[in-house]
Image: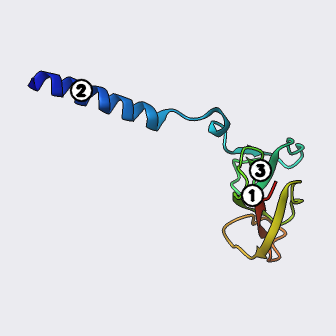
Amino acid sequence: MKRHHVIRLALLTLACVLVLVTEAPAQIMTRQLVCPEKKIPVGWIKVDASTSPSDCGGNAWILEPYTNKSVGSAMTVCADQPTPPGWETLGFATSTGQCVDDGFRGDNIKTIIRVD
């Protein structure tokens, strides 16, 4: 009987680990880093900028998909991005840690929400 409990516990533990490490296909690639001269792919939006010299010489964009978000989901994105169809802008803010590049002027981020 004790051995039966050990086996059951081991199987339960294995199942929990598999659930935690398995990702849904839409969530596998959540961000990508691109150089600004590349066109932003359809369904992606700029959510940050990287000034690390190893990333496009200190001028890179960090993109995140918006098409895999459910209605009611909110995202904080760079304010210079157009609001995608089916999304609404909630407001603008200034951040010194997100979407900061050489042309930092304030009101550099905005929050958008999916409505459709």
In terms of sequence position, does the residue under pointer 3 or pointer 1 come before the other? 1
Whole-angstrom CA distance, mark 3 to mark 1, is 12 Å
* Residue located beneath label 1 in the image: 49
Nearer the observer: mark 2 or 1; the answer is: 2
User: Disc 3 on helix, strand or loop?
Assistant: loop
Name the residue located 43 percent from the left edge and 30 percent from the top edge. 18
| Image x and y of residue 97, in percent | 66, 68
In the rendered image of this protein, does residue 110 appear above or below residue 87? below
Q: What amino acid is found at the position of numbered circle 1 in the picture?
A: Ala
Whole-angstrom CA distance, mark 2 to mark 1, is 48 Å
Q: What amino acid is found at the position of numbered circle 3 in the picture?
A: Gly
Image colouring = rainbow
Name the residue nearer the viewer: 14 or 61.
Answer: 14
Name the residue located 74 percent from the left edge and 76 percent from the top edge. 94
> Quick one: label 3, few (<14), some, or many (20+) residues within 10 Å?
few
Q: What amino acid is found at the position of numbered circle 2 in the picture?
A: Arg
Q: Quadrant of the N terminus?
A: top left
In the rendered image of this protein, does residue 77 appear above or below residue 93? above
Q: Quadrant of residue 6?
A: top left
Name the residue nearer the viewer: 54 or 104.
Answer: 104
Nearer the observer: mark 3 or 1; the answer is: 1
User: Disc 2 on helix, strand or loop?
Assistant: helix
Name the residue located 69 percent from the left edge and 57 percent from the top edge. 73
* Residue located beneath label 3 in the image: 57
Q: How many marks?
A: 3
* Residue located beneath label 2 in the image: 8
Can you name the residue that lies furthest to the left here? 2
User: Disc 1 on helix, strand or loop?
Assistant: strand
- Looking at the image, residue 107 sits to the left or right of residue 7; the answer is right
